[in-house]
Image (tube, rainbow, N blue to C red):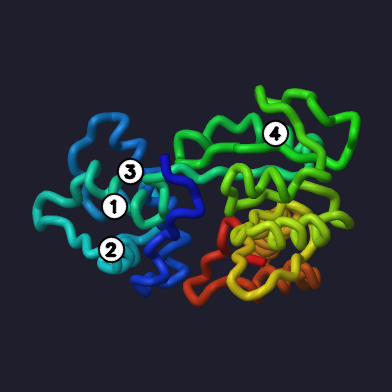
Amino acid sequence: MATGRTHRPATRSRGIPEATVARLPLYLRALTALSERSVPTVSSEELAAAAGVNSAKLRKDFSYLGSYGTRGVGYDVEYLVYQISRELGLTQDWPVVIVGIGNLGAALANYGGFASRGFRVAALIDADPQMAGKPVAGIPVQHTDDLERIIQDNGVSIGVIATPAGAAQQVCDRLVGAGVTSILNFAPTVLTVPDGVDVRKVDLSIELQILAFHEQRKAGEDGGAAAAPTPQAAAAAADQGPDGDVPAVMPA
């Protein structure tokens, strides 16, 4: 079985915009649901509605994949599932390590969606010696002293950081030094990485602040006068894309 070190997704080399790449998982989720219901074809309007985008944007995104559908028929669901999975690099096995097995890390380890989407949790790592050897989601936790060896032994190129903020940069540096080139960061801090390393940041507090901004704006509209936004909300609004979209996962 192939591992994450044998292949990189083709999206960048094919010139697919990052905004399109960010929407491909949304299309794949909607298509997978259609496939599970044995739906053979889907129109751009139906798929766009299921993915939460407009149909013109969907057709533009699919044009980067070389898929244009068939007039009067739509898109072949199974073929699109394969095509998008291939572009995202999900037709192979991606070993992943999770560092920081507190409440969040343990919840991630127990998440059943990784395996069905091409990701295998190869190791769980924590700095607490008392955690060493304890099984979480059927996987024994290993100590951070062995991080580099674990990365090398499992051919890992994707790491998940679920540590406290104060430990995240050091863990990041060690992951990168061991050969990890993609990091999903749940720690509430911004990581510094060298060129060639991709970081995606998941910050639930930021997402809640964005929702608070929209709730405040709606309340202001209902009351006839919008209240002045908080600095956090103003920053959230400034981070919106040219189409007014706020990404579900904020890039670092």
Give whichever of discs 2 and 3 has the lower sequence position.
3
Residue 57: x and y in percent read: 34, 66
Look at the image and tell me whether residue 219 can be seen: no
How far apart are the alpha carbons under marks 2 and 3?
15 Å
Q: Amino acid at mark 2?
A: Leu
Q: Mark 1 is on which residue type?
A: Gln
| Numbered circle sitting on residue 31 | 3
Q: Name which residue type carries label 3.
A: Leu
The percent position of residue 102, horizontal first and vertical second, equals 81, 37
Q: On the image, numbered disc 4 is attached to which residue? A: 107
Residue 151 in view, yes or no? yes
N-terminal of the pair, mark 4 or mark 3, is 3
Q: Which residue is the site of mark 1?
A: 83
Mark found first going from the N terminus, 1 or 3: 3
Residue 124 picture location, percent across and down: 71, 37
N-terminal label among 4 and 1? 1
Q: From the image, state whether disc 4 or disc 3 is nearer to you.
A: 4
Quadrant in which the N terminus appears: top left
Q: Residue 65: which disc?
A: 2
Which of the two labelled residues, at mark 1 and mark 2, occupies the earlier sequence position? 2
Q: Is residue 95 left or right of residue 99?
A: left
State the separation of the CA atoms marked 4 and 3. Answer: 26 Å
